[in-house]
Image (tube, grey):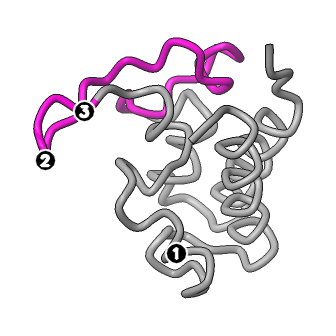
Amino acid sequence: MNEQKAKDLSIEVWEEIVERELLDKEDLSAQVFNKVKNMPGKCPLCALFNEQITSIEWQNNCSGCPLKEAGQQCLKSGDEDYYSIWLNSVDTKEQRIEGARNVLRIIKEWKIK
């Protein structure tokens, strides 16, 4: 997968999350979910920027990922970054969807080199 395909598929995933106000990638439509279900984190960006060590383990190497470039780290714990707000915020659904909107915005703004 090249960067443009990863970006396009990531936008497709996050647009559906935002539009349908999804709280879990498992709830994506079958059409979208089937495209990402075998990717680490069900994420095209993780599939592109992470290196597979074994058939079940992935090295967390996010260099080049637009989320990391924007100062976000989706694999860290806590709720300081947009992905974690979407994934972990238990306060309100609105906070989670706002986190998803910000993830989508960053991916859309990503300028492929």
Q: Which residue is tagged 3?
A: 52
- The magenta segment: 52-77
Instruction: Tell me whether circle 3 and circle 1 mark residues in contact (CB < 8 Å).
Output: no
Which x, y percent locates residue 33? Answer: 52, 75
Q: What's the mark number on residue 33?
A: 1
Q: Residue at the spot x=79%, y=51% of the render?
A: 101
Give the residue type at disc 3: Gln
**Label 2 vs 1, first from the N-terminus:** 1
Measured Cα–Cα span from mark 3 to mark 1: 21 Å
* Rendered location of residue 86, percent (x, y): 58, 52
Label 1 crowding class (10 Å Cα cut-off): few <14, some 14-19, many 20+?
some
Crowding at dot 2, Cα within 10 Å, few <14 / some 14-19 / many 20+, comes out as: few
* SS label for mark 1: helix
Helix, strand or loop at mark 2: loop
In this view, the residue in front, 87 or 37, is: 37
Mark 3 vs mark 1: in front: 3
Q: Amino acid at mark 1?
A: Phe
Q: Which residue is mark 2?
A: 56
Q: Are marks 2 and 3 in contact (CB under 8 Å)?
A: no
